[in-house]
């Protein structure tokens, strides 16, 4: 240990030494880590591809909006033969940090358009599948916020999360300590072919109960949760069995299959080839100042986010 | 794939194989669960690969990787806490007393809040200075000092004079 703080007492130092020894022993007892390299490369490629596609898609949206705006302006005050030009040209900028990727070339633009459209289409498609599976219970489901869905019925809004997470993410966990869940058990979907975990937990103090089901499908983990209307403190009118049935509904299973298939397709696309020479999107900044000591902290502010979520675009862990 | 990209991938793979075990140990001390620690390391490596062209330029890549790991751990704990708050029953029944329960280091660490636990692991396992821990967790040095001191006291209380086992709980 270096740099002992002045207010660390000798008692603390002794305890810290003992603690360090215990931690050494605990860590030494670990079995060797299996080789995770290939899986990490696969996940990293997927994250890289998605992050780039998402940003390029967003910019495409902006460009498209600009085009629409120009068309509107042209229709309002100009003629078809008169190009609309801005009254004041935008000032030139040299701040490349705000331009996270190079000028769009036709190939990435096409990819981006597809990605940008698919994001909205994906959400609508998922909402439609959720409505088919849960609509009888919580009303029509629509996109809600940036990554949620919500069912609306009888004046209540019940948040719904639906994730197809690449990889073997953990299933919805039974709340700890054991026994605090109202329900935490194994269930089966799709004619006993898929084993799932269903959890009902929460209570009045938490604004109502939540019902969750999760299971593994091919190489992904699927999580579906219906939460309470916390403003009204009303639990969703969904039982564990009903949610299991909804998760096993053909519409939702078809949606899961589509998402898994799309994830595989995205993975097969080689981002290094598609974006050769392109800068990455908001990568961590290992500036020399922040990494000039072996134990110094880095600044990978934008490098971590929810593991493999279908909505991930490379956010920060503190978001 | 270009030769440069292939070389970059090869560099990453070399680093991942060489540094994975150390990350795994830290991850295990942070989360207390081998399987979860493995997942944390995998996520960390995936993020390193995602930004490898920048990460590889870091003068001290281990520090960079550790920062990613720690923030990822805290991020997941926050997410789990939100789930727990949404799912937990308000007044859980107290666990039945189990006098035969062996006190373990991991169980004791598990009683610390995630951020305090991260401070303890970074400070005493990774051997970082107070200022380094503060920078990594984006808090003040006085917070690190007071949290570490409080955590040590709490660990002492939990561990007491009992025989300490380091088995996984």
Image (cartoon, rainbow, N blue to C red):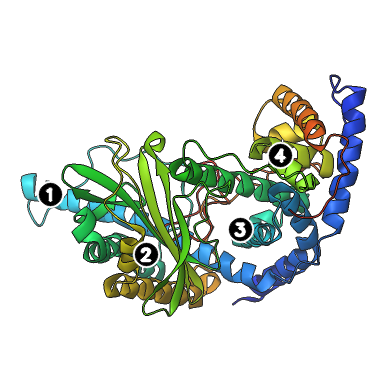
| Image depth: mark 4 or mark 1 in front | 4
Mark 1, other Cα within 10 Å: few <14 / some 14–19 / many ≥20: few
Looking at the picture, do discs 3 and 2 lie on one chain? Answer: no
Which x, y percent locates residue A10?
Answer: 92, 24
Q: Which residue is mark 1?
A: A72
Residue nearer the viewer, A162 or A97: A162
Query: Mark 4, residues whose alpha carbon is within 10 Å: few (<14), some, or many (≥20)?
Result: many
Residue A165: percent from left, percent from top: 47, 64
Instruction: Identify the residue under disc 4.
Output: B117
Q: Mark 3 vs mark 2: give the one in front.
A: 3
Q: Which residue is mark 3?
A: B47
Between circles 4 and 3, the one closer to the viewer is 4
User: Where does label 2 land, which residue?
Assistant: A112
- In the figure, A142 relative to B145: above or below? below
Q: Nearer the viewer, mark 4 or mark 2?
A: 4
Q: Is residue B137 left or right of residue A201?
A: right
| Residue at left offset 35%, top offset 48% | A227
Q: Pointer 2 indicates a residue of which chain?
A: A
Q: Nearer the viewer, residue A299 or A78?
A: A299
Neighbor class of circle 3 (other Cα within 10 Å; few <14, some 14-19, many 20+) is: many
Give the CA distance from mark 4 to mark 2. 42 Å
Label 3 to label 2, Cα distance in Å? 22 Å
Q: Nearer the viewer, mark 3 or mark 1?
A: 3
Query: Do dots 4 and 2 share one subunit?
Result: no
Pointers 2 and 1 within a single chain: yes
Q: Quadrant of residue B152?
A: top right
Identify the residue shown where x is 89% and y is 43%: B163
Q: How many marks?
A: 4
* Chain name for mark 1: A
Residue A111 rendering spot, x and y as whole percentages: 38, 69
Residue A47 visible to an observer of this rendering = yes
């Amino acid at each position: 240990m270096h740099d002992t703080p002045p207010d660390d007492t000798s008692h603390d130092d002794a305890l810290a030494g003992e603690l360090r020894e215990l931690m050494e022993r605990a860590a030494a007892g670990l079995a060797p880590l299996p080789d995770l390299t290939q899986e990490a490369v696969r996940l990293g490629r997927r994250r890289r591809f998605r992050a780039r596609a998402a940003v390029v898609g967003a910019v495409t949206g902006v460009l498209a909006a600009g085009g629409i705006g120009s068309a509107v302006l042209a229709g309002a005050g100009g003629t078809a033969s008169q190009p609309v030009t801005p009254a004041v040209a935008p000032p030139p900028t040299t701040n490349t940090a705000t331009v996270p990727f190079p000028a769009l070339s036709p190939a990435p633009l096409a990819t981006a358009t597809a990605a940008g459209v698919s994001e909205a289409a994906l959400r609508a498609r998922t909402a439609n599948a959720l409505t088919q599976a849960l609509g009888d219970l919580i009303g029509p489901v629509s996109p809600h916020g940036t990554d949620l869905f919500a069912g609306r019925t009888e004046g209540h809004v019940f948040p719904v999360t639906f994730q197809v997470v690449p990889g073997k993410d953990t299933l919805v966990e039974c709340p700890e300590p054991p026994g605090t869940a109202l329900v935490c058990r194994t269930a089966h979907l799709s004619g006993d072919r898929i084993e799932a975990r269903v959890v009902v937990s929460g209570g009045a103090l938490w604004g109502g109960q939540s019902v969750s089901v999760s299971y593994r499908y091919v190489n992904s983990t699927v999580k579906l949760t219906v939460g309470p209307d916390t403003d009204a403190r009303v639990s969703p009118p969904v039982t564990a069995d009903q949610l299991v049935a909804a998760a096993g509904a053909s519409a939702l299973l078809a949606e899961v299959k589509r998402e898994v298939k799309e994830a595989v397709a995205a993975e097969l696309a080689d981002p290094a080839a598609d974006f050769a020479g392109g800068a990455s999107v908001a990568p961590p900044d290992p500036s020399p100042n922040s990494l000039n000591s072996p134990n110094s902290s880095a600044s990978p502010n934008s490098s971590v986010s929810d593991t493999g979520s279908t909505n991930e675009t490379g956010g920060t862990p503190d978001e | 794939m270009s030769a440069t990209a292939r070389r970059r991938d090869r560099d990453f793979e070399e680093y991942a194989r060489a540094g994975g075990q150390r990350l795994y140990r830290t991850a295990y001390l942070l989360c207390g669960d081998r399987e979860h620690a493995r997942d944390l390391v995998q996520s960390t490596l995936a993020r390193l690969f995602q930004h490898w062209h920048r990460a590889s330029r870091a003068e001290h890549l281990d520090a960079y990787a550790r920062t990613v790991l720690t923030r990822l751990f805290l991020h997941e704990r926050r997410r789990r806490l939100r789930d727990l708050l949404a799912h937990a029953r308000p007044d859980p029944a107290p666990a039945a007393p189990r006098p035969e329960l062996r006190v373990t280091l991991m169980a004791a660490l598990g009683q610390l809040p995630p951020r305090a636990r991260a401070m303890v692991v970074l400070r005493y396992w990774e051997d970082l200075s107070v200022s380094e821990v503060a920078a990594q967790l984006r808090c003040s040095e006085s917070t690190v000092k007071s949290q570490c001191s409080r955590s040590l006291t709490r660990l002492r209380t939990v561990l007491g004079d009992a025989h300490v086992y380091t088995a996984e709980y």
